[in-house]
């Protein structure tokens, strides 16, 4: 066990009711530890962006207190904000500017003196150096997203918020961005990201907070949460339907479905030995062919239902 690091952000009793009367956040208490990657997971409209925007001082809370790196975000807005970099959900860039100009300009906005060698390093780390003179409108979507990260890092923030960093990004680039974010964490930057994807939270985060309908329903270490994320289900579409399960398959808890056309195996994806490879080997030994195979993980909704049930039961 490692000792928990001290909080770099502390949120207490935070609520937000929009002018429309909508309760977007309900009494949120949350501490973010220095140097961690914290993933805020939740469905559309859960309140993730509202929470981030309040911490970043863009949206005013209805009540509550937020301290970022020792500064109250309302009373000491500038001091708090200078510690924070924000990569917003939407790509907002100056289409006609170059990568270099927009990144250097962002640094100036925070009243920081120019520091070309730092900007160069940021661009190199984000694999944008060879595009430094390119106009933003000529870049691909993935590169534009990296420019957003470069801008957010331009003033050397201690804390970086990434609001759905990989929305609309392909799988390869997504993994690439995960690597880059991990690299930033290694340099000591505290990272808070929002995502809809369990996989993303699983790959990236040290801790995960689950937010649903404005309430933070759970905050846990990634490893312990992943254990709760339910089982995985493997379905095999058989070439020839089976009338009964053969004795040779007795060691796997299998179910025949769809009139014997489908074989279903439920396993714990967190176990090292899932039993899947050995099952597939045995099927081949028994000459049981399948046309197709797919696995399904509990959806976020399944998990929320499970979590809420668990809470009401306890
Ligand atoms: N300016 C606003 N005025 C009124 N309601 C708002 C405003 N901004 C957000 N909301 C509402 O607050 C709720 C939370 O929205 P928020 O954008 O924080 O959710 P989210 O978890 O980030 O969702 P998504 O995953 O879709 O980005 C939603 O019901 C949304 O419609």
Image: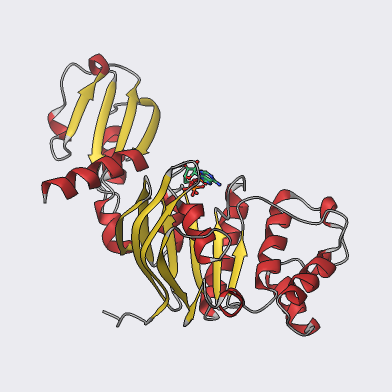
Give the image location of residue 105, x and y in percent: 80, 71
- Quarter of the image with the N terminus in it: bottom left
Question: Height in image: 190 above or below 235?
Answer: below
In the displayed structure image, the side of residue 151 where residue 197 appears, left or right: left
Q: Nearer the viewer, residue 285 or 235?
A: 235
| Residue 288 in view (yes/no) | yes
In the displayed structure image, the side of residue 51 where residue 293 appears, left or right: left
Q: Nearer the viewer, residue 228 or 269?
A: 228
Give the image location of residue 205, x and y in percent: 42, 64
Question: Height in image: 249 above or below 184?
Answer: above
Give the image location of residue 198, x and y in percent: 41, 50
Question: Height in image: 295 above or below 274?
Answer: above
Q: Quadrant of residue 56?
A: bottom right
Q: Residue at x 24, y 52 (%)?
A: 228
| Residue 271 in view (yes/no) | no
In the displayed structure image, the side of residue 23 where residue 240 appears, left or right: left
Give the image location of residue 308, x and y in percent: 23, 45
Q: Residue at x 26, y 46 (%)?
A: 230
Q: Residue at x 14, y 40 (%)?
A: 251
């Amino acid at each position: 066990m490692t000792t928990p690091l001290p909080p770099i952000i502390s949120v207490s009793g935070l609520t937000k009711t929009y002018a429309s009367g909508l309760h977007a956040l309900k009494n949120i208490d949350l501490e973010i530890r220095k140097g961690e990657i914290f993933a805020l997971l939740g469905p559309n409209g859960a309140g993730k962006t509202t929470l981030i925007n309040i911490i970043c001082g863009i949206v005013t809370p209805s009540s509550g207190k937020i301290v970022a790196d020792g500064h109250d975000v309302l009373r000491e807005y500038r001091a708090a904000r200078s510690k924070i970099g924000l990569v917003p959900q939407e790509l907002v860039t100056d289409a006609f500017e170059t990568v270099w100009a927009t990144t250097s300009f962002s640094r100036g906005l925070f009243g920081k003196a120019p520091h070309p060698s730092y900007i160069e390093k940021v661009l190199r780390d984000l694999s944008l150096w060879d595009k430094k003179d390119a106009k933003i409108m000529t870049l691909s979507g993935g590169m534009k997203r990296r420019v957003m990260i470069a801008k957010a890092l331009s003033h050397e923030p201690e804390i970086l918020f990434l609001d759905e960093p990989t929305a609309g990004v392909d799988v390869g680039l997504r993994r690439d961005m995960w690597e880059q974010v991990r690299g930033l964490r290694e340099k000591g930057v505290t990272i808070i990201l929002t995502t809809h994807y369990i996989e993303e939270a699983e790959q990236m985060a040290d801790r995960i907070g689950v937010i649903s309908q404005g309430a933070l329903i759970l905050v846990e270490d990634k490893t312990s949460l992943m254990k709760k994320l339910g089982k995985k289900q493997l379905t095999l579409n058989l070439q020839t339907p089976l009338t009964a399960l053969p004795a040779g398959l007795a060691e796997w808890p299998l179910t025949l479905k769809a009139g014997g056309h489908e074989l279903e195996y439920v396993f714990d994806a967190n176990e090292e030995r899932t039993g899947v490879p050995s099952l597939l080997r045995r099927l081949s030994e028994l000459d049981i062919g399948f046309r197709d195979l797919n696995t399904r993980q509990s959806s976020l909704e399944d998990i929320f239902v499970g979590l809420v049930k668990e809470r009401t039961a306890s």
